[in-house]
Image (spheres, rainbow, N blue to C red):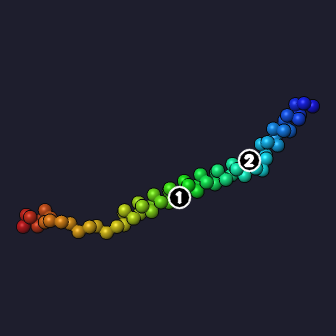
Amino acid sequence: MFHLQIFTWNISILFNTQYTAMRYSIMLQLVTGITLVLVGGAAIFAWIQNRPNPPQQGASLTEQTK
């Protein structure tokens, strides 16, 4: 009987809605943070790949040999 009470008490702690909500809240924050970092990195990478080339200063090698 004593063991059954301890087992029931442990199960009620494991499935307590307060702790479960806290766990899901932390998990949601982690997923949101990781998603924002990945989307931000992809946006920066896309911007770097698609930005216009700056004009070159000075003469190019082909103009010097002419």
- In the picture, measured across the screen, residue 7 lies left or right of residue 45, that is right
- In the picture, measured across the screen, residue 59 lies left or right of residue 12, that is left
> In which quadrant will I find the C terminus?
bottom left
Within the image, what quadrant is residue 32 found in? bottom right
Q: Position of residue 27 (x, y in %)?
A: 64, 51
Question: On the image, numbered disc 2 is attached to which residue?
Answer: 19
Q: Position of residue 24 (x, y in %)?
A: 68, 52
The answer to whether 6 is drawn above or below residue 55 in the figure is above
Crowdedness near tag 1: few (<14), some (14–19) or many (≥20) residues, C-alpha within 10 Å? few
Nearer the viewer's eye, disc 2 or disc 1? Answer: 2
> In which quadrant will I find the N terminus?
top right
Q: Total label count?
A: 2
Can you name the residue that lies furthest to the left here?
66
Kind of residue sitting beneath label 2: Tyr
Inter-mark Cα distance, 2 to 1: 26 Å
Question: On the image, numbered disc 1 is attached to which residue?
Answer: 36
Kind of residue sitting beneath label 1: Leu
Q: Position of residue 7 (x, y in %)?
A: 84, 35
Closer to us: 54 or 50 = 54
Q: Position of residue 18 (x, y in %)?
A: 76, 50
The answer to whether 38 is drawn above or below residue 50 in the figure is above
Under tag 2, what secondary structure?
Answer: helix
Within the image, what quadrant is residue 52 found in? bottom left
The structure residue drawn at horizontal position 13% and vertical position 66%, both measured from the top left corner, is: 59
The structure residue drawn at horizontal position 26% and vertical position 67%, both measured from the top left corner, is: 54
